[in-house]
Structure formats: structure tokens, C-alpha cells
Image (spheres, rainbow, N blue to C red):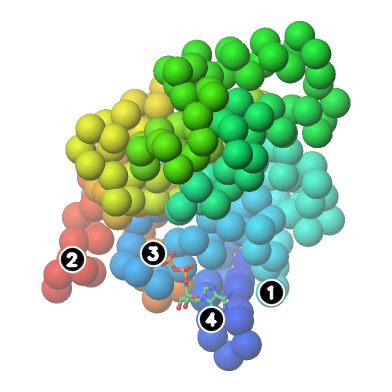
């Protein structure tokens, strides 16, 4: 999918969260790194329309995030920083079924779709559990399964390995690496994005570097530890 920012900017009152930005993203794996408060989440939320530009436009394959809000939401899934917040129903299986069900899938086709995605992420054994009975990594996989089951073209992750131990990080990294969908990943976990095709470094609401992941990581280190 082609994501186009055309002089898109975000202001909250006097505060500029994102300076006017024009760029096109079409790579399969895109990393977004930068200091706290540099504008990464604002940038990511603009892509699926969770945040609307104060000026300019953002479009996904020509679909405008303001005018074509609903279509954009079906094309781009978002995994929040705390995935527990997006697991709404008490039982994991029901939560994963929620998205496809609300789009009209039912009966055997619904059960099959849920079983397929549970197996796909190796979490079939968690189907009848409750969110508070899962580890951070398992919660990430459940949130990812609940998004992937609706067949988006793009998945946006906001710090998916935040607060995870090494084992859970590896589990989440493998899931992201194996995704068929295009992925945009905000992360402070530099190992996660090191192999990506493209990486953006945010600093003070603008892009300080846009290019290869190794170079982006070097630039980020220069900014963080001058
Ligand atoms: N709803 C809002 N109202 C006012 N200011 C906001 C709002 N959302 C974000 N900001 C401000 O915009 C700036 C960019 O925030 P953003 O969350 O995009 O940064 P970030 O790089 O994702 O940070 P972190 O790594 O801490 O998650 C920050 O100064 C933040 O305080």
C-alpha cells in the first residue's frame, strides 16, 4: 500500500506535535524511532485516521483519512501501546471473533476464520482464557490476531515490545517478521527494526532522518546521546 503525506501537520492548540510533512511510504517494513514526545505516535495515528491532520492530507492508496475514514480503518489495523486496552470481550476467542462478526461473518465460516488466525499465531491454547491471564507478549499476539483476522493491508504497531522480556520480545518480533501485511512499527527496541527496509527518525515533531535502518539507528544515537 502507498501511504502519502501531503503537507500533513498536527497541532494541539499552540503545541505543534508534527510539523508539515510530505512523504510517501510503500515499503513492506518501516521502522519509526526517536525520543519520547518526538511525534512518533502522532505520525502513526495519522495513518489510520485516529488523529486527523490540522492541515494537509494523509491518504492510503488514494483513500483520504478524513473523507474516506471508514474505508481507511478497514485497510489499516492499529496495535496500541497497551494491547490489553483493545481486547474488549472477556474471552479471547470472542474478542478475536468480534471484528469479522461485525462485518457479517457468522456460523462455521466465523469459527473457521478465528481458528485459522489462532493457529497462525500459535495461540490456539489461549482461546478460552481471559486477558488478565496472559503475558504481555501473549496479549500482543492476541491483539495482532484480532486485527489480522479482519484482513487489513497494513498493520501499525505502537511500541509492541515495550516492557516485554527477551522471550516475549522474540515471540512478537517473529510474529511481525512473518506477517504477510505491510507493517509500520514504532519502537524504542532497536533490534526490532534493525532489519527493516526503511526507518524514520523523529525529532521535535519532524523527520530528522529517512533511509536505511542501520543509518537511522546511528542518527538516533547521535540525537539521543550527543
Ligand atoms: N492529545 C494531545 N493533546 C495535546 N498534546 C499532545 C496530544 N497528543 C500528543 N501530544 C503532544 O505532542 C507531542 C508528540 O507526542 P507523541 O505521542 O506523538 O510522541 P511520541 O514520539 O510517540 O512519544 P513516546 O515515545 O513517549 O510515545 C508531545 O509533546 C505530546 O505531549
Q: Is residue 195 left or right of residue 146?
A: left
Q: Does dot 1 land on a helix, a strand or a loop? A: loop
Please determine whether, in this image, residue 6 is positioned above or below residue 71: below
Dot 3: few (<14), some (14–19), or many (≥20) neighbours within 10 Å? many
Q: Does any portion of residue 6 appear in the rendered image?
A: no
- Residue pointed to by mark 2: 222
Dot 4: few (<14), some (14–19), or many (≥20) neighbours within 10 Å? some
Gap between marks 2 and 1 measured at Cα: 31 Å
Marks 3 and 2, the one that precedes in the sequence: 3
Q: Considering depth in this image, is 142 or 26 the residue closer to the camera? A: 142
Gap between marks 3 and 4 measured at Cα: 13 Å
Measured from the top left, where is residue 116 in percent x and y? Answer: 58, 13
Q: Is residue 150 left or right of residue 170?
A: right
Measured from the top left, where is residue 226 in percent x and y? Answer: 14, 73
- Residue pointed to by mark 1: 54
Which residue shows up at 25% across the image and 47% down it? 190
- Residue pointed to by mark 3: 202
Q: Is mark 3 within 8 Å of ligand 1?
A: yes
Marks 4 and 1, the one that precedes in the sequence: 4
Dot 2: few (<14), some (14–19), or many (≥20) neighbours within 10 Å? few
- Residue pointed to by mark 4: 16
Which residue shows up at 49% across the image and 17% down it? 124
Gap between marks 4 and 1 measured at Cα: 10 Å
Marks 2 and 1, the one that precedes in the sequence: 1
Amino acid at each position: 500500500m502507498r501511504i502519502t503525506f501531503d503537507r500533513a501537520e498536527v497541532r494541539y492548540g499552540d503545541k505543534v506535535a508534527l510539523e508539515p510533512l510530505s512523504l510517501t511510504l510503500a515499503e513492506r517494513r518501516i521502522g519509526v524511532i526517536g525520543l519520547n514526545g518526538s511525534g512518533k505516535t502522532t505520525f502513526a495515528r495519522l495513518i489510520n485516521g485516529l488523529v486527523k491532520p490540522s492541515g494537509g492530507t494523509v491518504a492510503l492508496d488514494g483513500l483520504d483519512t478524513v473523507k474516506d475514514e471508514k474505508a481507511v480503518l478497514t485497510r489499516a489495523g492499529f496495535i496500541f501501546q497497551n494491547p490489553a486496552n483493545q481486547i474488549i470481550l472477556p474471552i479471547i476467542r470472542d474478542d478475536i471473533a468480534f471484528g469479522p462478526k461485525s462485518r457479517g461473518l457468522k456460523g462455521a465460516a466465523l469459527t473457521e476464520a478465528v481458528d485459522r488466525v489462532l493457529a497462525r499465531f500459535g495461540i490456539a491454547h489461549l482461546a478460552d482464557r481471559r486477558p488478565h491471564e496472559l503475558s504481555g507478549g501473549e496479549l500482543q499476539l492476541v491483539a495482532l490476531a484480532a486485527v489480522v483476522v479482519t484482513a487489513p493491508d497494513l498493520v501499525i504497531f505502537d511500541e509492541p515490545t515495550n516492557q516485554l522480556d527477551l522471550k516475549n520480545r522474540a515471540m512478537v518480533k517473529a510474529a511481525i517478521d512473518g506477517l504477510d501485511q505491510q507493517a509500520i512499527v514504532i519502537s524504542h527496541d532497536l533490534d526490532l527494526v534493525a532489519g527493516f527496509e526503511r526507518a524514520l527518525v523523529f525529532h521535535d515533531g519532524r523527520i530528522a532522518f529517512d533511509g536505511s535502518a542501520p543509518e537511522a539507528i546511528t542518527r538516533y544515537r547521535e540525537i539521543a546521546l550527543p
